[in-house]
Image: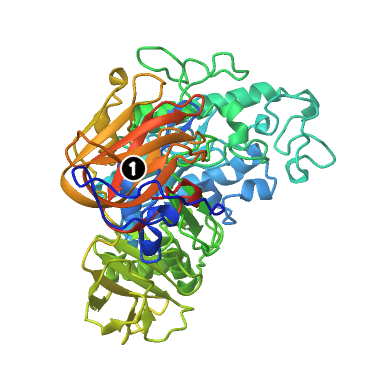
Amino acid sequence: MSGPISRRSVLAGLAASTVAASTVAAAGPGGTPAAAAEAALPLVPLRIPKLDQGTWQQPDSRVQWMRDDKLAMFVHWGVYAVPAQGEWYMFASKTGPTAYRSQYADTFATRSRPYDPAAWAQLARDLGAGHVVLTARHHDGFALWPTAHPDAWSTAAAPFPAGTDFVKGYVDALRAAGLRVGLYYSPIDWRYPGYYDVTGTKPPSPALASECVLPGSPYPWNCEGSDPAGFDYHESARTMKNEVYQSVKELVTDYGAVDDVWWDGGWLAQQGTDADGSFFWEPGQYRDPGNSWPVDAAYGDTEPGTGRPLGLTGLVRRHQPDALTTPRSGWVGDYDVEEGPAVPTGPIRFGRLVQKAFSVGGAWGYSGDNAMSFPSAMAVLVNSFVRDMCVIVNVGPDATGAVPSTQAALLRRLGGFMRANREALYGTRGGPWNPVDGQYGFTFSDRTVYAHLLAGYGGGSSFTTPALGDAQVTAVYDGVSRNPLPFGAAGGNCVTITGIDRTRYPDDTVVAIVLDRTVVPADIARGCPATADSVEARHGNLAANAVDGDTSTRWCAADGGTGHWLRLDLGSMRPVTGARIAWELPGKACRFRIDGSADGASWSTLADLTGNTAAAQVQTAGFTARTRHVRVTVTGLDSGAWASIRSLEVYDRPFVDPTAPASTTAAL
């Protein structure tokens, strides 16, 4: 939170003929008048799509399925299952590309024949997952389908029988099981020395890490020629890039709908970040025709109508417009990933979709029949859910495609927990309150809050809720048995629940708390008639967009001037407690005033932010009044900003936005 603000009265009273004002009070942090701020229930912070490299992130409507499904299953399977030392074995052992292929391809081709993707699909269903992601190609460069690129290593070549296509079998099995399809793809390919030196600088600059070079040499470990100093690394990198574009084009055109594209490995030479490699991979909407590593026309794709060459995300969006992607190609991605077995801590992951990715077998690829403990896996799952994260759980099948028995048993046990507590998990959001590390956290849906008492909770068989705002508890029950639980007032509008059975699932005991109203205050402006003095009609930026509940749409005035207004009609005189506004752009300060009216003709000020200097994209204003019409007038703009609103929300209950700094809150 930012520092304290100067609170001054901007409204002493409102004429009865316009807006009937009730309590006149200073606003508290996040939007609620100070007297009620302590009791306010938090709003869900807005997720606003970002524009990166010419492509917008998917809107909420297209990511919602991943939020609701909560759980996915990852399958790391490939030639690396033969040496059985994990998916990084080729690099860790410094087995060169030719030796790696000659040592393991024949064995994998033989042992993989009985692979049964239907068994994977059934295990995913047993886990309670909504979709599965398969490593179509990992860093060793082996593709599980018969790709057409002439330099590729895939099932198209011997020793694999003609027609071998592991991806097709997997996709068909998932669809038959009613599961969504995810494909993992790694741009990294250890078969190409050019990956480590895309510019062809000799010796490589910056210098490669010590684990990436030949003994006593500055050149890449995977360069197999007798003269590494004379190798054409730049052209090797360009060929690798060509193969990537051909491969991705096949994956997004040959297998029907793909719901999730799990990029992994946009970084170059195993240094820096994925975004640092963007100049090479060109992961955004378009490719630059002048790029130093051009993609041949035979392998790339172009935008219909314009003929512009498409980048990786442009290629995916052209053929799979609904697909979600990770940020690991170098583009921002539609969701973030937190990888590893560490238990999530800290606050709810506000304003974005975050996936927790972890492997139950230590390594991601096959490394024997081993698995983490059930309590350890549960801690990762539940501490993710209460932080509004979804989870993908990885298994590493052996070369036959069989998931190790200990991993399969663990996933089925986790699935038992998911089924028993499905009401508190699927289709919920994390919150509304932040969790207490190691103790408890919350999920919620509609009128019910689910308290998750974790293994470290020290309160025994009783639990006291946080303050419930303006809501009252109507019922409490055990999340599994649904048997009612006794409860009583605990002061400060908190409730103490007793008689909780911690024995069934001590790693996460779920208690359902039913309120007399929705957990999160509802936006009463959603879908109301909206008008504006000016609209950018040629781009479809109409007034109604500001109240459609979709932050990927917006109202915008037809010019960049000030004085433009957006107005909505609540339909009748309503009590109101404040508003939340999401502006088009981040980093731009908008100055504005919110007015109210009973008849749409005579207006009085509800909140005055005409002196605002905060460049917050989301701003809240708290006020207490009765009104039918609400109008936002833009009185000042930073350079480059227009009067443009993605979302205008109005509330009739005390509320607080946990992400809104105090400096953006209006004083009444």
Coloration of the structure image: rainbow
Question: Which amino acid type corresponds to the residue marked 1 in the rendered image?
Answer: Asp
Q: Is residue 474 visible?
A: yes
Relative to 462, residue 442 above or below: above
Task: Check disc 1 and report the residue beneath it.
Answer: 60
Foreground pick, 41 / 215: 41
Q: Position of residue 386 (x, y in %)?
A: 41, 63
Instruction: Count every numbered label the image shows and give the total.
Output: 1
Residue at left offset 40%, top offset 57%: 388
Q: Position of residue 294 (x, y in %)?
A: 57, 17
Q: Regarding mark 1 in the picture, which secondary structure is present there?
A: helix
Q: Residues within 10 Å of mark 1 (few under 14, many from 20)?
A: many
Please give left or right for residue 562 compared with residue 598 in the image: right
Image quadrant where residue 606 sits: top left
Q: Position of residue 252 (x, y in %)?
A: 38, 32
Residue at left offset 30%, top offset 67%: 449
Q: Position of residue 366 (x, y in %)?
A: 52, 57
Foreground pick, 556 / 86: 556
Relative to 591, residue 366 above or below: below
Relative to 396, residue 277 above or below: above
Please give left or right for residue 395 compared with residue 173 in the image: right
Q: Residue lying furthest left in this view?
A: 572
Q: Is residue 58 visible?
A: no
Residue at left offset 60%, top offset 41%: 102
Foreground pick, 535 / 115: 535
Relative to 585, residue 540 above or below: above
Q: Residue lying furthest right in this view?
A: 216
